[in-house]
Amino acid sequence: QVQLVESGGGLVQAGGSLRLSCAASGRTFSTFYAMGWFRQAPGKERELVTAINWRGSTIYYKESVKGRFTISRDNAKNTVYLQMNSLNTEDTAVYYCAADREYSRSVARDDMAYWGKGTLVTVSS
């Protein structure tokens, strides 16, 4: 089993910043897992925002967040972070932390095996 718990969501004004955290645990979780952040806005499909391999050496970003969002991980703490800067109203969504054994497959399929419950990010204009 893998448990993923997100924190750090909230309400922020456009142009502001938020930092999301995701703590991973469980018998089958491994620091070798790829981690990612997905989001789902109201009325829209879930989308992959960013993903990072276990080393932190390979990172994917959705085009619309490049230069604004930064994913990082601390394997000693089994935690992944998402620093979000220059937020705009289109970033409003529930953000989900996810994990998977395979980084490349996860990015190609826009999907991962394990999921957190999500944290709401609301950006006001």
Image (cartoon, grey):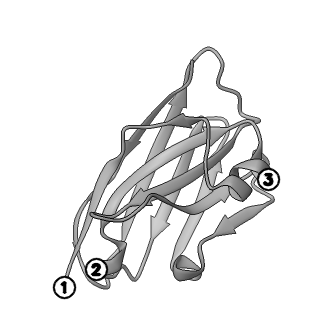
Q: Are marks 3 and 1 in contact (CB under 8 Å)?
A: no
* Residue 18 disc label: none
| Figure disc tally | 3
Please say if 125 is above or below 69: below
Within the image, what quadrant is residue 6 found in? top left
- Residue 13 screen position, x and y as percent: 22, 78
Residue pictured at 52% horizontal, 77% vertical: 65
Please say if 61 is above or below 114: below
Q: Are marks 2 and 1 in contact (CB under 8 Å)?
A: yes
Q: CA distance from mark 3 to mark 1?
A: 36 Å
Within the image, what quadrant is residue 76 found in? top right
Residue at the disc numbered 2? 89
Nearest the viewer among 78 and 125 is 125
Q: Under tag 1, what secondary structure?
A: loop
Looking at the image, tell me whether mark 3 or mark 1 is earlier in sequence order.
3
Q: Under tag 3, what secondary structure?
A: helix
- Residue 56 screen position, x and y as percent: 75, 54
Residue pictured at 68% horizontal, 53% vertical: 109
As shown in the figure, which amino acid type bears the numbered disc 3? Ser
Q: CA distance from mark 2 to mark 3?
A: 30 Å
> With 93 as the anchor, is 99 left or right in this view?
right
As shown in the figure, which amino acid type bears the numbered disc 1? Ser
Nearest the viewer among 90 and 81 is 90
Residue at the disc numbered 3? 104
Please say if 47 is above or below 4: below
> With 77 as the anchor, is 121 left or right in this view?
left
Residue at the disc numbered 1? 125
